[in-house]
Amino acid sequence: MVAATHHQVHLVLVDSGTHAWRMPASHPLSVDHDRAHWCICTTIQSTVPPFMVANFAALEAGSQQVTCSIDGDEYCQASFKYQGKCLEWVCRRNTELAGADRVDVDRLLDGTGCEQLVG
């Protein structure tokens, strides 16, 4: 999965001539580290958040199965308790952020499609 994601990020979000991250010119991020996070988030936006949110909802409902739409196709599998715990942790840690940390995280996630993981 990591290799596939890296390959997809490289194909979609890295300019083949300059090897620089491609992002909308209007986006406020300027540091390469921030750009890398933004590019990874926009790459996973159609797969990870829909599954994580649907999995959490299935667990909350006591369902043994999670069904969601990933890239426009229906996806089903057994609900996964560990992923539910991970999402709970991410949400809890996000609510604990304050001040400049909150601003930084919100800025990094803005427009990536991953906002739903912390909302």
Image (cartoon, helix red, strand yellow):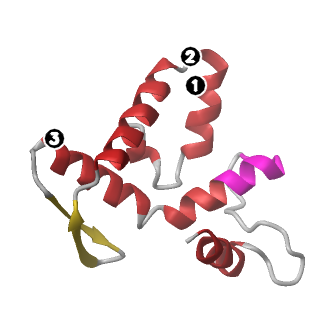
- Check disc 1: other Cα within 10 Å, few if <14, some if 14-19, many if 20+: some
Magenta highlight: main SS: helix
Look at the image and give the residue range highlighted in magenta. 29-37
Q: Is mark 2 in CB contact (under 8 Å) with mark 1?
A: yes
Q: Check if residue 28 falls in the magenta segment.
A: no
Say what amino acid the circle numbered 3 marks.
Glu
**Residue at image point 40% right, 44% down:** 117
Please tell me which residue is depicted at 61% across the width and 16% down the height of the picture: 99
**What residue would you read off at disc 1?**
102
Q: Is residue 94 left or right of residue 116?
A: right
Disc number at residue 60? 3
Quarter of the figure with residue 26: bottom right
Q: Position of residue 17 (x, y in %)?
A: 88, 83
Give the class, few, some or many, for how many residues have Cα within 10 Å of label 2's Cα (few <14, many ≥20).
Answer: few
Spatial separation of the CA atoms under disc 2 and disc 1: 5 Å
- Name which residue type carries label 1: Arg
> Badge 3: how crowded within 10 Å, few (<14), some, or many (20+)?
few
Eyeballing the image, is 50 above or below 53? below
Nearer the camera: disc 3 or disc 1: 3
Cα separation, mark 2 vs mark 3, equals 28 Å
Q: Residue at 56% x, 66% y: name it.
A: 43
17 horizontally vs 1: left or right: right
Marks 3 and 1, Cα distance to the nearest angstrom?
A: 27 Å
Question: Label 2 amino acid?
Answer: Ala
Q: Are marks 2 and 3 in contact (CB under 8 Å)?
A: no
Query: Residue 23 location, x and y as percent?
Result: 69, 63
**Which of pointers 3 and 1 lies earlier in the amino acid sequence?**
3
Checking the image for residue 98, the label placed there is 2
Query: In front: 103, or 93?
Result: 93
Left or right of residue 54, residue 108 in this image: right
Question: Residue 88 bears which disc, if any?
Answer: none
Q: Quadrant of the C terminus?
A: top left
